[in-house]
């Protein structure tokens, strides 16, 4: 891995010029400005603090930016991760978040070391889009307290939170609603005037000035220490090993999400830049960072598609961008902490409402609907609901099972059609038949033959006279299982007992190997295996009507 990162550095910084440096600096400053409000918001949304979000973004930018598998990846706390962490925080508190984060870091690191970065390819795109939407729903629901100025508490399931919020609506704080509305409107309107300054940053600034200026009774984000080593953090000698067993599944969820989101972000960045990411090296960097971050008081981090895209679109060319973005956040923590502490939680709630809406992959969903890919829409919807109601790991498993089940159903469909002998067609191909053969049946089999569809195969052959000569054309049958082999043997024996015969044509390699190993081909005889149906028909014709012997 050390050689891999050195090779990445050599390719990345060869011919590095002053123009490249200028572009990286400007992009780094831009990404830092975009990341500041998001880091604060996702820290709170994770069940931790705004300071934890900042620390996470700083360390992720420095560590993953330095060791990552691509020059464009910007990592930090994300909305998707916060949706998982809020549940862990509700059950186990911040110590549980830290231990789960440490465990997930080890898992992600192992994925990278054992070069399993391609596992993302086994998760269907409808499932990925579905759990992204489910996570967006969790983020939006989780911010209802901040946006409405309520304190209903932390819930393991957001639908229970929604019920609690509905009951507390009469106590909603109109000032909190107004503050969140200012941020939402600003974020939606600001891009029409300028894209250089992040709308979220402008919205938070305006909302904070208004709230503080008018003395609105709102809860601020709280104290931000002037350090990246927070007072509340995981200590080397304070690991609660009793939590490990109960946190195993949450840690798997965090690791799965971290790996998936990072590799997806890399795929997006590679498409935008044309630079291929080393997925295994990226997982190593993500894993190491998530092992380290809990000991500073941060929350688990992963690559962020939005911030990565901003860096690329701002002209960033190397990993100087994510590293400089971390430096910008560090400077903001050390210099502007007194100002940041005044930001109302309602303002961060407004940022996350807009972020959750933008997280939805509307373009992909529209594609599925317009192309009438209803199975994909179904997998998307089920995964989204499962993510919201259950948890990420269960949702992914459910979505993958649905997608696989549909694929197996489609792939396992078998078509069996029957056709008699056409003497004219045979003659046109230069094979004149000596006799008339109404008892020859050519059976065309298309699709794999296995336990799920063998009944269809046998039903198509029902009523076939025992004395008939059956030609099974198998060019469209890629393979078969043990039940399929048994069905073949049954057909062969039935026709043999009735005085007929069975011939096989167009055997595919996989099917041939299976029938050879099972002894079916030996039982049938090599003279009953042909390249095409015409050859089989000619063979039967010669056997039934041998040429007269000259006498």
Image (cartoon, rainbow, N blue to C red):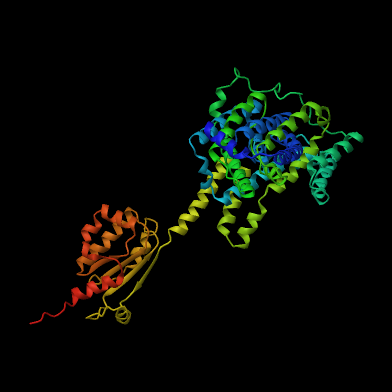
Side of 269 where 443 appears, left or right: left
* Residue 181 in view of the camera: yes
Outermost residue toward the right in this view: 214
Percent of width and height locating residue 497: 20, 66
Instruction: Look at the picture and state if 171 lies above or below 467.
Output: above
In the picture, which quadrant includes the C terminus? bottom left
Percent of width and height locating residue 387: 61, 44
In which quarter of the view is residue 366 placed? bottom right
Side of 262 where 144 appears, left or right: right
In which quarter of the view is residue 412 placed? bottom left
Side of 216 where 132 appears, left or right: left
Front residue (pair 85, 512): 512
Instruction: Look at the picture and state if 543 lies above or below 299.
Output: below
Side of 202 where 284 appears, left or right: left
Percent of width and height locating residue 408: 46, 55
Front residue (pair 271, 421): 271
Instruction: Look at the picture and state if 377 lies above or below 99.
Output: below
Label count reads 0
* Residue 390 in view of the camera: no
Instruction: Look at the picture and state if 112 lies above or below 519.
Output: above
Query: Which residue is found at the position 79% from the left and 47% from the top?
Result: 195
Front residue (pair 321, 437): 321
């Amino acid at each position: 891995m050390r050689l891999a990162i050195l090779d990445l550095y050599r390719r990345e910084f060869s011919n590095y010029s002053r123009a490249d440096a200028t572009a990286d600096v400007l992009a780094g400053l831009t990404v830092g400005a975009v990341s500041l409000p998001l880091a604060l918001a996702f820290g709170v949304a994770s069940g931790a603090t705004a300071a934890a979000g900042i620390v996470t973004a700083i360390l992720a930018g420095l560590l993953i930016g330095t060791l990552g598998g691509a020059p464009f990846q910007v990592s930090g706390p994300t909305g998707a991760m916060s949706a998982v962490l809020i549940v862990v925080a509700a059950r186990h508190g911040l110590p549980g978040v830290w231990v789960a984060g440490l465990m997930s870091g080890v898992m992600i690191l192992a994925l990278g070391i054992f070069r399993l970065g391609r596992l993302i390819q086994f998760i269907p795109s409808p499932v990925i889009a579905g759990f992204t939407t489910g996570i967006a729903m969790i983020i939006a629901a989780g911010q209802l307290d901040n946006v409405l100025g309520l304190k209903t508490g932390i819930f393991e399931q957001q639908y229970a939170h929604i019920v609690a919020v509905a009951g507390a609506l009469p106590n909603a704080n109109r000032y909190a609603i107004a503050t969140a509305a200012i941020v939402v409107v600003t974020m939606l309107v600001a891009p029409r005037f300028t894209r250089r300054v992040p709308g979220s940053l402008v919205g938070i600034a305006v909302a904070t000035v208004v709230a503080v200026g008018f003395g609105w009774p709102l809860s601020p984000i709280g104290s931000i220490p002037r350090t990246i080593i927070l007072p509340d953090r995981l200590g080397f000698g304070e690991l609660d090993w009793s939590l490990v067993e109960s946190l195993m599944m949450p840690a798997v969820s965090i690791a799965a999400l971290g790996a998936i989101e990072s590799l997806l972000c890399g795929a997006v960045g590679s498409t935008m830049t044309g630079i291929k990411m080393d997925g295994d090296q990226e997982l190593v960097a993500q894993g190491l960072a998530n092992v380290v971050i809990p000991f500073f008081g941060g929350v688990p981090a992963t690559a962020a598609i939005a911030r990565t895209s901003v860096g690329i679109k701002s002209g960033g060319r190397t990993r100087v961008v994510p590293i400089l973005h971390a430096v910008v956040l560090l400077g903001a923590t050390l210099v502007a902490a007194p100002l940041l502490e005044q930001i109302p939680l309602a303002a961060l709630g407004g940022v996350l409402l807009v972020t959750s809406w933008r997280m939805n992959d509307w373009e992909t969903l529209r594609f599925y609907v317009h192309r009438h890919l209803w199975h994909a829409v179904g997998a998307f919807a089920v995964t989204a609901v499962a993510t919201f109601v259950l948890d990420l790991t269960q949702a992914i498993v459910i979505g993958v099972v649905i997608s696989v089940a549909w694929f197996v159903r489609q792939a396992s469909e078998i078509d069996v059609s029957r056709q008699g002998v056409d003497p004219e067609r045979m003659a046109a191909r230069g094979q004149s038949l000596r006799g008339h053969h109404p008892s020859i049946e050519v059976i065309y089999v298309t699709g794999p033959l296995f336990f799920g569809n063998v009944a269809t195969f046998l039903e198509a052959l029902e009523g076939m006279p025992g004395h008939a000569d059956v030609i099974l054309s198998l060019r469209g049958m890629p393979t078969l299982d043990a039940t399929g082999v048994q069905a073949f043997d049954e057909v062969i024996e039935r026709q043999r007992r009735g005085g007929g015969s069975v011939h096989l044509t167009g055997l595919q390699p996989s099917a041939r190997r299976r029938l050879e190993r099972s002894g079916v081909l030996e039982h049938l005889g090599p003279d009953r295996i042909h390249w095409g149906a015409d050859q089989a028909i000619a063979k039967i014709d010669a056997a039934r009507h041998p040429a007269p012997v000259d006498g």
